Amino acid sequence: KLDACASLLWSLANGELIDAKLSAYFGPRYEETQWAAPVALGAPVGGDGRLRGDLTDLIGGQLSAAVKPGKLQAKLTGRAVARIMHGLSSPAFPYKEHSRSKYWGMHKSVAFDRVKAMAEEVLETARRRMRQQEAALQARERARKRKEPGA
């Protein structure tokens, strides 16, 4: 019996037996069946269109509110928007003010990183449109001033 124990310990030390046991245990039985999440957190209910629409509405409202004089708003980021969509408060967007919004916690079932990435895209698009509208307004104003007599 002592020789059997010694040979077992020797094979364990060399890793021969462990490798065989582990491959037999974790082998084909687990590779054949793939684990799948019971609920896919990646896909939003209603598809990406609904999430993008909600993000566009929320961001458009926040950006237009930030333009109003006398209303100081925190800088809007993709993370801040994702926090609102997940119902997570922050010092910049406290629960007391934003929990009344219809968007508060609306997309909790969607992965946070996915909401954040899409919010950053929508924010960039909205800011680009605002810059284009501002440039067009300034161009019209300059054209109007050139047409005025005595200017």
Image (cartoon, rainbow, N blue to C red):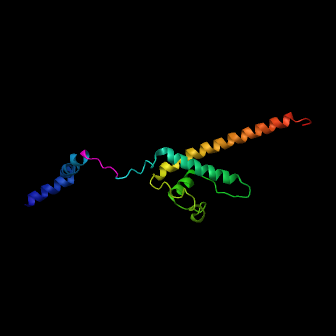
Q: Is residue 151 left or right of residue 88?
A: right
Quadrant in the picture for residue 4: bottom left
Q: Residue at x 58, y 52 (%)?
A: 58
In the rendered view, tell whether residue 149 sits above or below residue 111.
above
In the rendered view, tell whether residue 36 sits above or below residue 93.
above
Q: Residue at x 46, y 47 (%)?
A: 46
Observer-nearest of 57 and 85: 57
Chief SS of the magenta region? loop
**Number of numbered tags placed on the structure image:** 0
Q: Position of residue 129 (x, y in %)?
A: 65, 41
Q: Residue at x 54, y 46 (%)?
A: 53
Q: Residue at x 56, y 53 (%)?
A: 81
Q: Position of residue 105 (x, y in %)?
A: 51, 58
Q: Quadrant of the C terminus?
A: top right
Q: Position of residue 118 (x, y in %)?
A: 52, 46
Residue that protrudes farthest toward the right in the picture: 150
Q: Which residues are magenta?
A: 32-37
Q: Is residue 19 left or right of residue 148?
A: left
Q: Is residue 71 left or right of residue 36?
A: right
Observer-nearest of 41 and 101: 101
Quadrant in the picture for residue 121: top right
Observer-nearest of 92 and 26: 92
Residue that protrudes farthest toward the bottom in the picture: 96
Q: Quadrant of the N terminus?
A: bottom left
